[in-house]
Each structure stands twice: as structure tokens, then as C-alpha cells.
Amino acid sequence: MAFVLPTTFLMRKALIILLSVFFLSFDLVEYSLYQKDDGPSKIKATHLYVFTKYFEWPDNSSTTFNISILGENPGLMSELTKLSATKSVGSKKIEIKNINSIAEANGPEILFILSDKSGVLTEAISKFKGKGTLIVTEKQGLAKVGSAINFVIVENNIKFELNKTSAGKAGLKVSSKIEPLASKVLD
Amino acid sequence: MLKCKTYHMLIGLMMLAGISLAQTSKVQRAYELVQQGKLDSAKMVIDDAMLEPDAAKEYQSWYIMGFIYKEIYKQRETSNVKSSARDIAVQALTKAVELDVQKEQTANMMQNLKYLGSKYNNDAIRTMDTVNYILSGELFEKYIKTYKLCEPGFNEISKRIEYYLAISYKFQGYFEETNSTNILKLTETYLNKALAHDPNSPTANKNFALLYYNMGVTIIKKMDYDVDLEQLYILQDHATKLFKQAEPFMLKAHGISPKDKTILEGLQGIYYQLNDTEKSNLYKKKFEEAGN
């Protein structure tokens, strides 16, 4: 004989059960933790700042330490702007400028020529010879052409080549402590 | 009143057919008590009744027992993730289903089991944290076991992958907050479990890639501008290794879901961080071409 629960009782319970059977879903798995940070720009910006500890600039009366970026790299500009808000070089406030031509460069302590503007390197070397401007580039082979620092990629990491002669011609003194850290040193 | 009494007696007689007289009265009594809302008394009586072999042979007894314990759970223990009443209810109802060979009440019993199973699932999700994660796993296993019985077409593998991805996602978040090695290991363990069930899960592969990618990004993000160059290279090298660890997972996810924009964006990001402009631009182009 069949086992039967009273109909009304059963119906009421069934309704409650149906209403109660719900799931908390797992839909959160479709979201991803994706941080859009510009690591290479942070690394290059940090290099530019750290270089100030390894080079000696001729004395000048300026109260600011100027870093000019020739070319377009919003990520790098953003990092340098952040950096300049909290750091200084000695007692000098760091000033960041984004320029589009050598003509706009007004005696910066560091001139970083981005890869798409590499063609102006020779002109920059000539313009800033002996004037205390550290010229930095980021294209294969430019240390040989005459930039004092050239960023290179070694096994997916950003490293730099050092051209001591170029630094000297620019009127800068180079600390010997930087040499072991360079991927290549050109005399 | 009389009508009601008679009605209950009839029902009781119907339900207890085939059970010995002594046992019949106990099970019937338990049933009457639960209908009167006297759950504690009903529980005592049914527990006593079930010690008798004759009662334990009948699916009806197990059904009543399961029903009583389910009511106890529902009325008093829904906020208790370790509810023993729920466990006993599931065990009793499972036994009842097994004994109901004629399928007289199987559908109703399944409804009760589904309800309890869904509660295991909900509690498994609620306990996905660094303190209760073992309990969460146990609750999830109970959910799987219960639902496999209730739904013949239940897709266990799919549910397992969803669960492992969800818990790994939560642990990934905890790891981002704490940087704890133990939490990282747990995150990897859960992602590996998801991949063990389906090595071609695009989400599992993508999340694995993003775990390592985010770790690499965090290293650089936290780096102080005052860092010396030796330390900078150590940190950069560490981050690069993590980006390289992320690469094969993201490539695999891309192979499975070539149009997935989050994966294309992920590859663009990985290669950008690896200073591989050519490949980064390639995936940037694919991302833009993929449309909305």
C-alpha cells in the first residue's frame, strides 16, 4: 500500500520546498583580476631617477633638475610625474617636460630620446656637447652612435648600456659603481 | 475535530502498512507529532522507532525520519553550516529512496533532498574563505553526492569546475590583499583541480595566467623609485619569470577561445610586460579586430 502524506500538508510543504530550492551562483568566476599597469615605464622612470646617483652634473644655479622626454609615451610621463611629486635630486625639485623636438630642449639634465625620435640623436649630441646633459636612448646600437645610456632588452628585462666616453663629452662625471650594473660598457 | 482525528488515523494506517504493530505505533506517533509541530518529541520517538529492525526495513520510516530532521534543520539550523539535522535528514531520505523500489514516494523524497542539497551548495559558497575552506569543500562534496542522487543528468564535472574556479578566484583576491604564500598555494591547488577536470577550460587557464601576471605587476608596482639598481634587477627578474609563467596558460586559453577579448588583452599585457613589443602589438591588433 502506498505511503501518502495528507494532500494539503504535502502541497504546502512542496510549495515551500520549491520556493526554497535556490542556488547561490558561481557567476563571479567570469571576472578577472587584470591590473593594467605599465611595468616597463615604471622601470625606465626608476632607472632615470637612480642614474642621478651615479652621475655628477656640472654645478649650475638652477633650482630644478630637468628631465625632458622627447617623443610620445604617456605611461612613462605618468610615472615620471608621480616620481617628481615625491622625489628630488639633492635639493633640486624634479621637473618633467614632454617635448617633440630638439629645439624645445632647453638644457635638461637628462634628455630621454624615445625610440621613434632616435633619428635626432646626432643632432642632440652636437647641441648638448659639454653642457651637462645626460642623453638616454632606447634603441639597439645607439650607445655606439653616442648616447651615454641606451636601454636594451636582455632576456625580456630592461637593462642599459653605458658609453663612458659620451658621458664625458657631455660634461658628466661617471661613478665607477655603475659599470658592473650595465649590460655593456663602451669606453 | 473528530473528522481530523479520523483522517490522521486513516493516513497513519495507510502509511504504516506492513510494519509490525509496536513499531507502527511509534512511527505513526512520530508522524503525528511532527504534524502538530512538536519536533523535539517527534525526533525522540522516531529515533527510538528506528532502532527496531522492522522499522528500518521500511522506506516510510526513513521518509518520516528524514522529514522530521529536515524540519528541524529548516526551523532551527539553516544558519548553522555544520547542521547535523541536515546531515541526518539527507542520510534518512537517501535510505528511503533506496528502499522505495516501487517509486511510490520517490519524487517527493527527491524534492526534499534537492532542497537540502541546495543548502549544502549555498553553505559551500558562504564558507569559501581562508578559515572555513576545508568545511566548504566538505559541504560541496555533500551537495554533489545529494544532487547526483536527485538528478540523473546532473553534470558533476561542470559543477566541480565552477566550484574550483569560484574558490580559486576568492583566494586569488585574498592573496592580492595579503601576499601570503599559503594562500597562493591554495589558489594554485584549486586552479589545478579545475584544470584536472577540464584541461581545456579557458577560464581556468586564463585565471591561472592572471594569477601570475598580477603577481608580476604587483612586484613592479610596489617597487620604490629609490630602489638601488641591483635590487631593481632582482625585482624585475622575478616579475619577468612570473610573466613567463603566465604566458603558456594565456596562450592555451587563447587557443581554446581565440575571440575572447579578455584573453587577447591578457596576451597583449603579458608581452608588453615582457618587453616584446612585436607580440604585444600583434595581440593588440587582434583585440581591436575582435570588436565588441
Image (tube, helix red, strand yellow):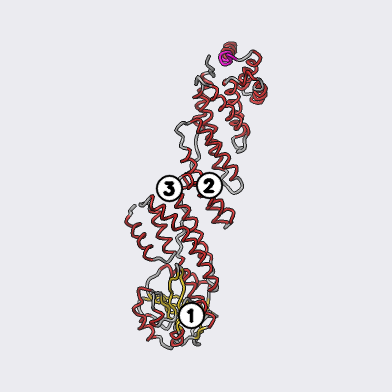
- The residue positioned 33% from the left and 60% from the top of the image is B285
Residue at the spot of label 2: B167
Highlighted range, magenta:
B11-18
- Cα separation, mark 3 vs mark 1, equals 54 Å
Q: Position of residue B22 (x, y in %)?
A: 66, 14
Query: Which residue is disc 1 drawn over?
Result: A65
User: Does label 3 lie on the same chain as label 2?
Assistant: yes
> Dot 3, how many residues are within 10 Å of its Cα: few (below 14), some (14-19), or many (20+)?
some
Numbered disc 2: what chain? B
Prevailing SS of the magenta stretch: helix
Residue B271 position by quadrant: bottom left
Element under label 1?
strand
Instruction: Tell me the distance, in whole angstroms, between the alpha carbons under discs 1 and 2.
Output: 50 Å
Residues at marks 2 and 3 touching, judged by CB atoms closer than 8 Å: no
Q: What amino acid does circle 2 point to?
A: Ile
Q: Position of residue B122 (x, y in %)?
A: 54, 39
Q: Which residue is mark 3?
A: B200
Rendering coords of residue B270 (x, y %)? 43, 61
The quarter of the picture where the N terminus of chain B appears is top right
- Sequence-earlier tag: 2 or 3: 2
What chain is tagged by disc 3? B
Measuring 61% from the left and 28% from the top, which residue is drawn there? B69
Give the secondary structure at mark 2: helix
